[in-house]
Image (cartoon, helix red, strand yellow):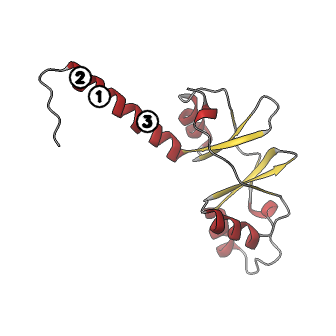
Amino acid sequence: MPVKNLAVGVVTASADASVKDLARTMLDEELGDLVIAEDDKPVGIVTDRDIALAVARYDDLSELTAEDIMTPDPVTIQEDATAVDLPATMADGRVRRIPVVDDDGRLVGIATLDDVVATAGEMLDDVAAVIESQSREFEPNE
């Protein structure tokens, strides 16, 4: 299964967006991250954790922008990469969220660790169904 099938819609912001605007967008959209994009290409990512740490690090947030707190050059994954590549790429980059890009590096979505876990759960359900149907002695606990 290609990663583009796991990716969900991504919400972006500009590098000059204020931290308050980033937090408001996350609140309104019920998100934990925003991809910072220029010309439809990811140049950074800001998470709710980045905003929380900014509160602790800076006395005055009023002048801070996404560029000040974002992780620049985020780890990305190609939309045609396999679903198996996704958790490996997350582990290599030590990230939970990865912008998904096309061959030209344009943003097409975002994949999260939650997507990996949900997909693995669905696969395990399918495996369990096969085991149940082919194992005459198997009786699931209900």
Q: Residue at x 62, y 63 (%)?
A: 48
**Mark before the other along the chain sequence, 3 or 2:** 3
Tell me the residue that label 2 is attached to. Answer: 133
Look at label 3 and name its amino acid: Ala
Mark 3 vs mark 2: in front: 2
User: How far apart in space, not on screen, are marks 3 and 1 (Cα)?
Assistant: 14 Å
Dot 2, crowdedness within 10 Å: few (<14), some or many (≥20)? few
Nearer to the camera, 113 or 6: 6
Q: Which mark is residue 129?
A: 1
Q: Residue at x 64, y 27 (%)?
A: 81
Residue 83 placement (x, y as % from top left)? 55, 30
- Which image quarter holds the C terminus? top left
Q: Residue at x 73, y 81 (%)?
A: 59
User: How far apart in space, not on screen, are marks 2 and 1 (Cα)?
Assistant: 6 Å
Q: Judge from the rendering whether residue 140 lies leftward or rightward of residue 36; answer left or right.
A: left
Q: Are marks 2 and 1 in contact (CB under 8 Å)?
A: yes
Quarter of the figure with residue 56:
bottom right
Quarter of the figure with residue 18:
bottom right
Residue 97 placement (x, y as % from top left)? 61, 47
**Mark before the other along the chain sequence, 3 or 1:** 3
Look at label 1 and name its amino acid: Ala
Look at label 2 and name its amino acid: Ser
Mark 3 vs mark 1: in front: 1
Q: Are marks 3 and 1 in contact (CB under 8 Å)?
A: no
The vertical placement of 88 against 55, above or below, is above
- Which image quarter holds the N terminus? top right
Nearer to the camera, 123 or 46: 123
Tell me the residue that label 3 is attached to. Answer: 120
User: How far apart in space, not on screen, are marks 3 and 2 (Cα)?
Assistant: 20 Å
In the structure shown, which secondary structural element does the residue marked by tag 1 occupy?
A: helix
Q: Judge from the rendering whether residue 130 lies leftward or rightward of residue 116; answer left or right.
A: left
